[in-house]
Amino acid sequence: MAMVVWPKRQRRVASGRFFTRWRRPVRDFCSALAIAALAVHFPAPISTSAELSHPAEYELKAAFLYNFIKFTEWPAAELGKSDDPFVIGVLGKDPFGGALDKVVGGETVHNKTIVTRRFARMDETAAGSHVLFISSSEENNLPAVLRVLGGQSVLTVSEIENFARRGGVISLKRENNKVVFEINLEAAKRAKLTMNAQLLKLAKIVKSAP
């Protein structure tokens, strides 16, 4: 995987300013690759303290989520009418706080306005999302959640351990102070989702566990 060496001046920028830049969604293809490809390095080591690591980490992960959407295609029939919103659902305990709303607020994708919705439990309404971020709080319910989704055209994303190998589409992971991701192409195919080839080059491709 490619690496970028940030200029010295940028490396000295305080973490607060760094993440302020990432709150705004990346709007073009090259910038999107710069976020994902490079498996973005945090400007300073992340503390194990939730108070220190949580806000910045989830601002960045919200930007990743936005870019996954930009480079995924849904079947036209699944997008609904042009005036229907594009729904990003968060199932379970929301780790983003206000970060996800800031990233996607006022944005459009596939000519549809993006909205975020939170769901305390898995039901038909949650399954009607275009994207469903499954919180780690739902790990014990994961098999049931994926059964409800079945072959519906929902892009599932989660931080749950081995999520993609367990049948989800995209796993978001933190490794060595970097955000990286895995994609299960079998799961994407079952959901009738087409993922941009350039995005696939940046991911670790995994298969469902036997």
Image: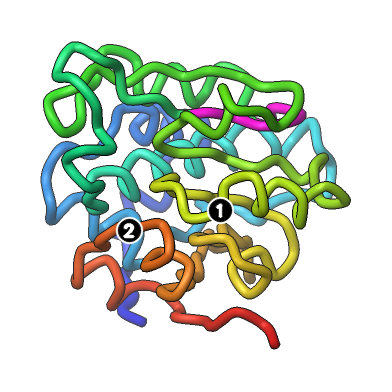
What is the quadrant of residue 193 in the picture?
bottom left
Mark 1 is surrounded, within 10 Å at the Cα level, by few (under 14), some (14 to 19) or many (20 or more) other residues, namely: some
Q: Where does the C terminus fall, quadrant-wise?
A: bottom right
The secondary structure type at the circle numbered 1 is loop
Question: What whole-number distance in Å separates the C-alpha atoms at marks 1 and 2?
Answer: 11 Å
Q: Is residue 90 above or below residue 33?
A: above
Q: Amino acid at mark 1?
A: Gly
Residue in view at x 23 percent, y 44 percent: 70
- Reply yes or no: does residue 21 show up in magenta: no
The x, y position of residue 72, in whole percent, is 26, 52
Q: Earlier in the sequence, mark 1 or mark 2?
A: 1
Q: Is residue 21 above or below residue 203?
A: above
The single residue placed furthest to the right in the displayed view is 140
The x, y position of residue 81, in whole percent, is 18, 20
Residue in view at x 48 percent, y 26 percent: 100
Residue in view at x 75 percent, y 22 percent: 120
Q: Is residue 137 above or below residue 140?
A: above
The x, y position of residue 109, in whole percent, is 20, 31
Residue 150: give its label: 1
The secondary structure type at the circle numbered 2 is loop
Per the image, the residue denoted by label 2 is 192
The single residue placed furthest to the bottom in the displayed view is 210
Q: Amino acid at mark 2?
A: Lys
Q: Which residues are magenta?
A: 89-95
What is the quadrant of residue 79 in the picture?
top left
Residue in view at x 84 percent, y 42 percent: 49
Q: Nearer the viewer, residue 15 or 147?
A: 147
The x, y position of residue 114, in whole percent, is 31, 21
Q: Nearer the viewer, residue 141 or 173?
A: 141
Contact between labelled residues 2 and 1, with CB atoms less than 8 Å apart: no
What is the quadrant of residue 113 in the picture?
top left
Q: Where does the N terminus fall, quadrant-wise?
A: bottom left
